[in-house]
Amino acid sequence: MTTYRSKAKDSYNTRMRFFKFQSMVNNVPFDKENFLAFSIVEGEEDNIAITKIYTTQYYQRERSNYLNGVKNTGLTIDEIYNKMQDINASDEDDWFTDYLTDFEHQYSIDQFREDTLAEKCYYCHITKNDIKTLVAKKMLFKKNERGFTMEIDRKKPNLEYTNDNCVPACYWCNNAKTDEFDDEEFIPIAKQIKAVFDKRLNS
């Protein structure tokens, strides 16, 4: 069962991943003050630009290549990768504690509860009752315990968990969407998932 603290930790890890990268490629001091100021939410366009470089270049190019659009252009991707392995928070528990204070304003526990208790998926609109019906009809074929409650998905997957960026999603949509698609790109795919479930429900 997902807990509020685990979602905060996921969000913390997202920020930390991109902050380490920003610290390395733009020569930003790696300290708690800069980390806490480095939010990845709508409106923080400079920080979002860093995530785009990370996701479209850092993991997409050969490791002997260089990155475009960053200050530290003298390092190859492989050299950046190796240097990033040596960067760690001096007291990670302390960093996370301070981050959690900000997170409680960013993604409230009330919104978290509303999302986890939602009755239907934001994307394909399958309901909990539909899922129970499919179970009774022996028409679900997953091989894990997920799927009986809604999960929390970030509409823009490389941004942090916020009230505006989080929606309830069924296991199948959350699994299919991964970090590749944003909400607008995924909705047409979700319509096809819904079509399959509707066919099973009506069979």
Image (cartoon, rainbow, N blue to C red):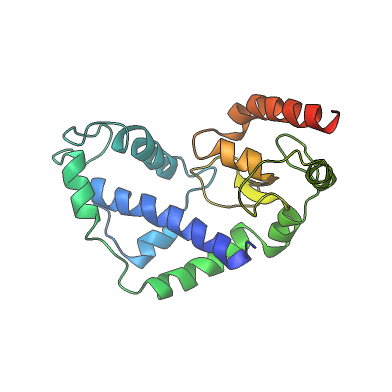
* Image location of residue 130, percent across then percent down: 82, 41
Q: Height in image: 114 above or below 60?
A: below
Q: Quadrant of the N terminus?
A: bottom right
Quarter of the image holding residue 49? top left
**Image quarter hosting the C terminus:** top right
Q: What percent of the width, then of the height, locates residue 141?
A: 67, 41
Q: Is residue 74 left or right of residue 143?
A: left
Q: Is residue 158 left or right of residue 108?
A: left
Of the pair 135 and 6, the residue shown nearer to us? 135
Q: Is residue 119 left or right of residue 45?
A: right
**Residue beneath the point at 72% across and 41% down:** 140
In the image shown, does 186 or 67 lie closer to the viewer?
186
Give coordinates of residue 188: x percent, y percent: 66, 24
Q: Give coordinates of residue 67: x percent, y percent.
A: 24, 34
User: Visible in this render: residue 169?
Assistant: yes
The residue positioned 81% from the left and 43% from the top of the image is: 127
The residue sitting at 16% across, 39% down in the picture is 76
* Quarter assignment of residue 186: top right
Q: Is residue 38 visible?
A: no
